[in-house]
Amino acid sequence: MTLPIERGLAKTFAGQIHYRSCGQGPTVMVSHINQQSSALMIELLQALGAHFRAVAIDYPSHGHSDHIDWQPRIEDYARAVIETMDALGIERAFALGEAVGAAVSIALGGGWPQRIDKVVLVNTPFFTDADTATRDIADIAKVRPSDATGFPAPRSIDYLLQNDPEHAPMQPTQSWMDRINVAQFEIGRDRWQAMQALSAFDTLGGMAALRCPTLMLYGEHFIYGRHRALLQAKCPQAKAEIIAGGRFCMSWERAQDVAKQAKAFLG
């Protein structure tokens, strides 16, 4: 049986934050990938919802959340998660996120240890230095075209796999691609806010600040998986697992595998 998804708005410092929620039980706060929204996390919410109450927000300027006219930090996204928890009456939770969402989960675990009990990091990105971050973001921008007004232009599956396979699932479907294109249009001209926030985030320092139990999940073919040992060395209690055949967007394509690993780790 497919579990229903509930939706709502939470009043926060960044305006109204939209969220999706599924299931009952201990809460898992789920954070989405850059330039996406909670709409791309529905499969994972439903997989987790069999055992947990899974809640995913749309970051400020993403999905159906209010847009902001200032450059956020990863810590601001984490604060939006915490204030959504406050609005929903959630005192403590687990944190799980993919890509930029993994950075948000790191910030949650390190910044609010009294609220976050365990952290699951899926495909954690890492830039070795500022120059690498600038170059990688510029390379991504080249394959994410805009229309004449500056809004993101829709992409086809063929275009994605030919030009940006590192940031695609192994076997994208048209339904998934449609959701990506909608999410991009919802972000509009603000679509680089999250990448800029990620480039400024101290991932190694964030890992070192984690004191809670931590699980690192990587797709076998994830582009930044080569940095796993470096990140894990900063967080000695972290456990690492590889999902065979996985690449990017595992919270969609490999939702059942991610949920299974999370369930075993979170209890």
Image (cartoon, helix red, strand yellow):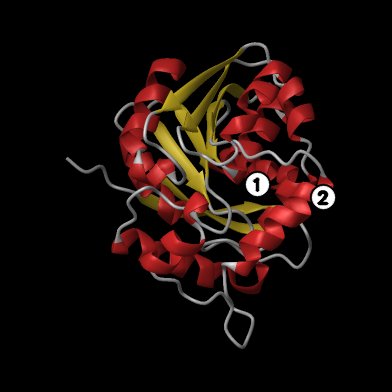
Between residue 57 and residue 190, name the one nearer to us: 190
In primary-sequence order, the first of circles 1 and 2 is 1
Q: Residue at x 61, y 26 (%)?
A: 228
Q: Quadrant of residue 195?
A: bottom right
Q: Is residue 245 left or right of residue 68?
A: left
Residue 23 can be seen, yes or no: no
Q: How busy is the neighbourhood of tag 2: few (under 14 within 10 Å), some, or many (20 plus)? A: few
Residue 131 image label: 2
Q: CA distance from mark 1 to mark 2?
A: 29 Å
Residue 102 in picture, x, y percent from top left: 59, 37
Q: Quadrant location of residue 145?
A: bottom right
Residue at the far left: name it.
1
Front one among 8 and 233: 233
Q: Residue at x 52, y 67 (%)?
A: 184
Q: Residue, x 42% and y 41% (percent of image)?
A: 250
Q: Amino acid at mark 2?
A: Asp
When the figure is inspected, residue 66 is found, relative to residue 72, above or below; the finding is below
Q: Is residue 88 left or right of residue 73?
A: left
Q: Is residue 179 above or below residue 215?
A: below
The tally of labels here is: 2
Percent coordinates x, y for residue 229 in the rendering: 64, 21
Query: Looking at the figure, which quarter contains the C terminus?
Result: top left
Residue lying at 60% horizontally and 53% vertically, measured from the top left: 59
Q: Would residue 204 be found to the left or right of residue 176 on screen?
A: right
Q: Which mark is residue 80?
A: 1
Q: Residue 166: x and y, percent?
A: 51, 50
